[in-house]
Amino acid sequence: MDTLYSFLGGSRGAWRVTSLRDVCGEGLPPVERVEVVQGGSLMDAALPPATAWRLRGLTSHVRYAERSEVDQLAAIQPATGRVEATCAALIPIRKKAAWWALAQDERRAIFESVSHHTEIGLTYLPAVARRLHHSRDLGEAFDFVTWFEYAPEHAVAFEKLVYALRATPEWNYVEREVDIRLVRDGQHA
Ligand code: HEM
């Protein structure tokens, strides 16, 4: 299943954890490294040895982006896996029941008309590559697993982006968030 991504926190993987911060709600245990695995089966229940936690999610179709936004994103968003993008952020997020009780148009209004999520995010492209994974319908602990890659010279810009988004009304609906930063050092790949 190509759309399935698993993030295995433990002592293996190409990405070394440089910080793990509990932003709100219950945190995650600290780990040394994260292994990113694409594919596999949702039925794989057993965690590999020495894995402290596993975050899983599926890439999927857009929910909120409108045609003009989809076109703008497609025109400038870079792919993941760029050689120079040796920094990454892994930010799992769960939203409150109040968010999920809203109708689609109400969520879109908060997400974009009020919070300008895409408009803000677009100004950080193509420096930042992103991949959004949906986890809610898998029964996972988080609703989303977000993954970003950028070069070290864009690390300060990425902080500004995260700061700006967390200050928006959309984030009033976030009840659990962990911010994990990583560098790719090629060890244990
Ligand atoms: C790099 C710049 C960014 C861009 C261009 C961007 C763009 C987008 C877009 C277009 C969507 C909606 C996809 C859809 O229509 O379903 C989205 C969803 C989302 N993004 Fe971002 N984003 C960026 C950065 C971030 C950051 C830094 C975070 C976390 C701190 C984040 C967290 C999320 C989450 C959790 C969702 C799902 C929201 C929901 O469905 O309720 N994004 N993003």
Image: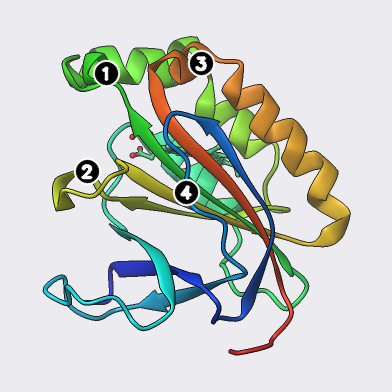
Query: Mark 1–mark 2 contact, CB under 8 Å?
Result: no
Q: Mark 3 or mark 2, which has the lower sequence index?
A: 3
Q: Image point 38% across, 18% down: which residue? A: 173
Q: Which type of secondary structure does the marked residue at label 2 adopt?
A: helix
Q: CA distance from mark 4 to mark 3?
A: 27 Å
Secondary structure beneath disc 3?
loop
Q: Which mark is residue 99?
A: 1
The amino acid marked with disc number 2 is Arg
Please name the residue shown 59% across and 25% down the image.
165
The mark total stands at 4
Q: In what element is the residue under mark 4?
A: loop
- Front tag of 3 and 1: 1
Q: Label 3: which residue? A: 115
| Tag 1 secondary structure | helix
Earlier-in-chain disc, 1 versus 2: 1
Q: Quadrant of the C terminus?
A: bottom right
**Residue 26 seen in the current view:** yes
- Within 8 Å: ligand 1 and the Cβ of disc 2? no
Residue corresponding to mark 2: 136
Q: Is residue 40 above or below residue 70?
A: below
Q: Is residue 62 above or below residue 24?
A: below
Scheme of colours in the image: rainbow
Quadrant containing the N terminus in the rendered view:
bottom left
Residue 66 visible in this rendered orientation of the protein = no
Residue 117 locus on image (x, y percent)? 52, 27
Residue at screen point 41% across, 24% down = 174
Sequence-wise, the earlier of marks 4 and 2 is: 4
